[in-house]
Amino acid sequence: SGTNQFIYFQTWFFTLFVIICCLLQLNYLNKALDTFNTAVISPVYYVMFTTLTIIASMIMFKDWDSQNASQIVTELCGFVTILSGTFLLHKTKDMGDSEAMESPLFTSPNLSSNPNSRPSEM
């Protein structure tokens, strides 16, 4: 049966805290998508989410307390494989396109139509 957790102050505090964190995350994700290319943001977001999920499960569920060293190393190798795969997919997605290889990853939006023009001094 259990007890009703909604009568405790801590439940409402942590619910509000989670909602605020989600709103902040969405705000900064939208700012990042406005500033940088989606091909840069998506892998970074995926890797950060995976990393923080693994850390949270280690803390909340004490994941590694009941595991031996080989199980922990196996889990870490899987995590490194996910990170490496994400990195390689991002780096090799435009290998056949020579124009995409010449452009830098972190570019700000162009303010002028001529890429060779310099901003005028005021």
Image (cartoon, rainbow, N blue to C red):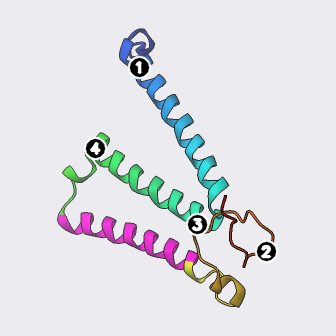
Q: Secondary structure at mark 3?
A: helix
Which residue occupies 39% across, 51% down? 52
Q: Which mark is residue 59?
A: 4
Q: Secondary structure at mark 2?
A: loop
Q: Which one is nearer the viewer's eye here, 89 or 32? A: 32
Residue count near mark 3 (Cα–Cα under 10 Å), binned few <14, some 14–19, many ≥20? some
Which residue occupies 58% across, 73% down? 105
**Mark 1 = which residue?**
13
Q: Which mark is residue 40?
A: 3
Q: Is residue 8 above or below residue 121?
A: above
**Mark 2 = which residue?**
114
- The CA span between labels 1 and 2 is 52 Å
Which label sits in the foreground, 4 or 1?
A: 1
The magenta stretch spans which residues? 69-90
Q: Earlier in the sequence, mark 2 or mark 3?
A: 3
Which residue occupies 63% across, 57% down? 35
Q: Please indicate, yes or no, whether residue 119 appears anywhere in the rendered image.
A: yes
Which label sits in the foreground, 1 or 2?
A: 2
The prevailing secondary structure element of the residues shown in magenta is helix
Q: Is residue 12 above or below residue 52?
A: above
